[in-house]
Amino acid sequence: MTSSDPFRVGLLGHGTVGSAFHELLDARAEAIEAEVGRRPEIAGVLTRSQGSFDEILERSDLLVELMGGTEPTREYVLRAMSAGRHVVTANKQLLSQHGEELFQAAREGGVQLRFEAAVAGVVPAIRVMNETLAAAYIERVHGIVNGTTNFILTEMARTGESYSTALEQAQELGYAEADPSEDVSGKDAAAKMAILARLAFNAPVHLGQVPFEGIERVTVDDIEYAKELGLALKLIGSAERVDGGISVSVYPAFLYADHPLASVNGAFNAVTVESPAITEITLSGPGAGGPQTASAVLGDVISAMIPPPSLPPPAIDQPVITDVEFSFYLHLEVADRPGVLAQVAEILGMQGVSIKSVVQKGLGDDARLVMVMHPVLESKFRAAVDLISRLDFVRSEPRVIRVIEEAFEAPA
Ligand SMILES: NC(=O)c1ccc[n+]([C@@H]2O[C@H](COP(=O)([O-])OP(=O)(O)OC[C@H]3O[C@@H](n4cnc5c(N)ncnc54)[C@H](OP(=O)(O)O)[C@@H]3O)[C@@H](O)[C@H]2O)c1
């Protein structure tokens, strides 16, 4: 082989991203050759109806995996790496469930495994965490890592439409799939946060360790009341160091207007990384879409054409903790009679929950109490809400949403 031999790329999957990648590679091949000295070309394409994995593997220097799912994808990726081929993938489900096995296989095979497009599309979160921030002690990562849900929440806030109307609109515009459950349930974001946590804390985090809540139960009321309190509602992925370990989760949360994620609207994604050394860095941009994702995938291919490899270091086991402190918003529909607020406050106080702000509105015989609490351990707050929900004057299921309190402040 000489440096003028083409760099042969085997392509697994030719759907939304795979076909956009194929087109982009063809369009950019000449420019890439001028830049790195070798011309990338597609050595074969595998779909359900065309191509043979073994033949494509044999003919390729690198495999691009854009099939999705975990099987047979996992098997293909492992076989490629053990045969000495670099792999580029956009597959968050695969990495969040089998990441450690795959990283180990890459180390053993002496090959690269690159996955920039698996988290936040073309936003370069992986590269920045792996390379630029390799020396920073990361305390916390917050992300809006699902464009579908961010689009829906933005539309609800902008137009006052219900969740289901905003979802229909997202589907019409191609921002949501016909079956949107992975996105709206928070599971897609949970997979991405597991990957980000692995890189931020060097801890092996499996998707199964990431509790997630979606946006299906968010109401326009929540969003309207929140506006009065100066808050914006987002589906937030959070990964942070807590006493004795790390915590990774996904939940709808209110953000104060000056938080860097509060103004990320529509189908955009963004990731905020907080560390004493760097204070805070926020990266934002398109989180999905064929051409956008393909651009991140091709960027990885070009990086793999130029050594050295960039794998995360071996993981160190750290406890993953699920009961941590949050500030909460509580929305109650109650009978409008004297003493109601006092009783609610008393129960909260008994559990050690203190109220930060309250909005109260009468609605005929009923009233709405909307409160924001100071930070408290989630288990204590949930215990208080459970007791409150059983009070005879409470008219419907209390609604609870987390509030992200403060912007990060690095020590002086
Ligand atoms: N779409 C996005 O905006 C986006 C953004 C970021 C990351 N991603 C990730 O990128 C990957 C691909 O997504 P996509 O939206 O392009 O998916 P897609 O449109 O459904 O395409 C999947 C492709 O893989 C092929 N395939 C699936 N299972 C296969 C199997 N068992 N054997 C052979 N071929 C198989 C399909 O073949 P057939 O054509 O024969 O069905 C199809 O060509 C996923 O991991 C996804 O999470 C997507």
Image: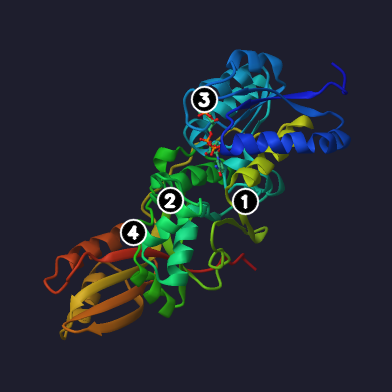
Mark 4 or mark 2, which has the lower sequence index? Answer: 2
CB atoms at circles 4 and 1 under 8 Å apart?
A: no
**317 up-or-down from 135: above or below:** above
Q: Secondary structure at mark 3?
A: helix
Report the amino acid beneath label 2. Answer: Ser
Q: Is mark 4 within 8 Å of ligand 1?
A: no
Residue linked to disc 2: 249
Q: Residue at x 55, y 45 (%)?
A: 196
- Please indicate, yes or no, whether residue 239 appears anywhere in the rendered image: no
Residue matched to label 4: 378
| In the rendered image, the vertical position of residue 174 relative to residue 308, given as above or below | below
For the residues labelled 2 and 1, say whether their Cβ atoms are less than 8 Å apart. Answer: no
Residue at mark 1: C-beta within 8 A of ligand 1: no
Question: Which quarter of the image is occupied by the C terminus?
Answer: bottom right
Quickly name the residue at label 3.
74
Nearer the observer, 21 or 316: 21
Chain-order first, disc 3 or disc 1? 3
Distance from Cα at disc 4 to Cα at disc 2: 13 Å
Nearer mark to the viewer, of 2 and 1: 2
Q: Which residue is mark 1?
A: 137
Q: CA distance from mark 4 to mark 1?
A: 26 Å
Query: Observer-nearest residue: 332 or 168?
Result: 168
The residue type indicated by label 3 comes to Arg
Q: CA distance from mark 2 to mark 3?
A: 25 Å
